[in-house]
Image (tube, rainbow, N blue to C red):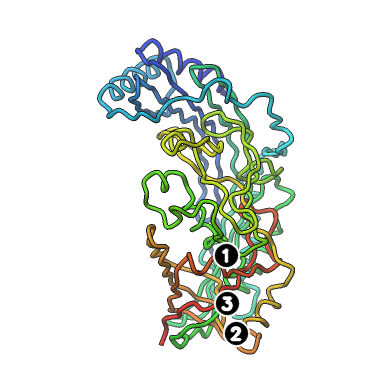
Amino acid sequence: MSQDLSALTDRMLLAARKAGADSADAMAVDGTSVSIDVLGGKLEHAERSEGIDIGLRVMIGQRQAVVSSSLFDDATLSTMAERAVAMANEAPEDPYIGLADPSQFAKGWDVDALELFDPTAEPKAAELEEDAKRAEASALAQHGINQVQSASAGYGRRRIHLATSNGFSGGYRRSSRSLSCVAIAGEGSAMERDYYGESRIFQNELPSAEVVGRIAAERTIARTGARRPKTGSYPVIFDERIASSLIGHLLVASNGSMIARGSSWLMGKLGEQILPSGLAITENPHRPRISGSKPFDGEGLPTAPRDIVRNGVLQSWTLDLANARKLGLESTASASRGTSGPPGPSVSNIALTQGDRSLQDLMKEMGTGLWITSMIGSTINPNTGDYSRGASGIWVENGEPQYAINECTVAGNLLNMLPRIQPANDARTYLSRVVPSLLVEGLTLAGD
């Protein structure tokens, strides 16, 4: 039975007031998800989940507590509120917590313009199973693939509603359909695997199962016969599929919670050059049909496009209300939250300026070096920006791909690496993080 989430959050706020809270906010998330896995052309696993999760944050003066539940009868709501108030009374004081002023709340947003929900009917389990089987068959049809580790298809939809005790109430819906495949080539110590997967809000935009299986296989085959590179200093290309992780380190370091704690390698860099001139990192929470889009943030503030980096210069931190107050700044409407914790700052859709050259052009400029297509592990010093990650990919000589590489480590320092990046023009614009392949000069490779 479908629940009115607005009425449910109102009931939660009423219970909080009755329990003695000075102020409160409430979140309700109603979700349905279906996942299907196949193996060897047969159904391996099928799962469907439905339910409502609720979260209540109460404040007593400058003390707060959060409680959550998957039940929402009146007795449960009363018990939740009473426990939350009791917890808040024992919590340490935090001078920076608190709801937004009513004048800051989002008003009159257009959810339909964001196109976050596909009204197409939920696919039947048999349809998802058929997608997964076709992806698996497509991968196995490629010469050199001897097995498929997994082929999975899924669908999900959810409703989200947020309300506060001082007047905000709003919600929206999301949907997604996904398909992925993991292919394996070789045997024993020579075994290699790789994957490909896609997810879309609108089901008719999802690539065919044959394309997903084929790309998973092609990526796996490209990894066969891998060897270790010679240790030394070389230029490196971060492939588009993993380049967003490099920019992600910058986004983490510019997160207001890191800055407020004084534990970021970007401390003191606001207003300084951190990327090459001409490059920007923009955040746009209003891109239609993109998974990270939203009309308001986790504290009810209106989201808006902004520049994180403009012309290579760091423009702002990513801030929710509490961290903005700590730093004496204004929130960037970047609060993110679930039902079981308080808000925290987080970016939504971001894009790095694309270049005017192809990946092949970057390889020609690189000459000899490593084209990284996957990474494992991560050792990033949050205070200094020292960077070290396991990598694999393709060795390039004279601008042409030669052979697969694995079991190596790439190292450098982000403060030195990021000002030297050169972007290609191959970013997938339908992703929430639009980042092209990136060429970086002079990194250290540890191999043989």
Query: Where on the picture, by quarter, is residue 367?
Result: bottom right
Lateral position of residue 157 relative to residue 256, left or right:
right
Q: Which residue is mark 3?
A: 371
Relative to 305, 369 lies left or right: left
The structure residue drawn at horizontal position 51% and vertical position 57%, both measured from the top left corner, is 250
In the rendered image, the quadrant that contains the C terminus is bottom left
Q: Are marks 3 and 2 in contact (CB under 8 Å)?
A: yes
Seen in the image, is 25 located left or right of residue 287? Answer: left
- Mark 3 crowdedness (10 Å alpha carbons): few <14, some 14-19, many ≥20: many
Marked residue nearer the N-terminal end (1 or 2): 1
**Residue 327 placement: quadrant:** top left
* Frontmost residue, 251 versus 84: 251
* 3 and 1 marks in contact (CB < 8 Å): no
Which quadrant would residue 274 be assigned to in this image? bottom right
Q: Amino acid at mark 2?
A: Val
- How far apart are the two marked residues, 1 and 2, measured between alpha carbons? 18 Å
Which residue does the numbered mark 1 point to in the structure image? Answer: 243
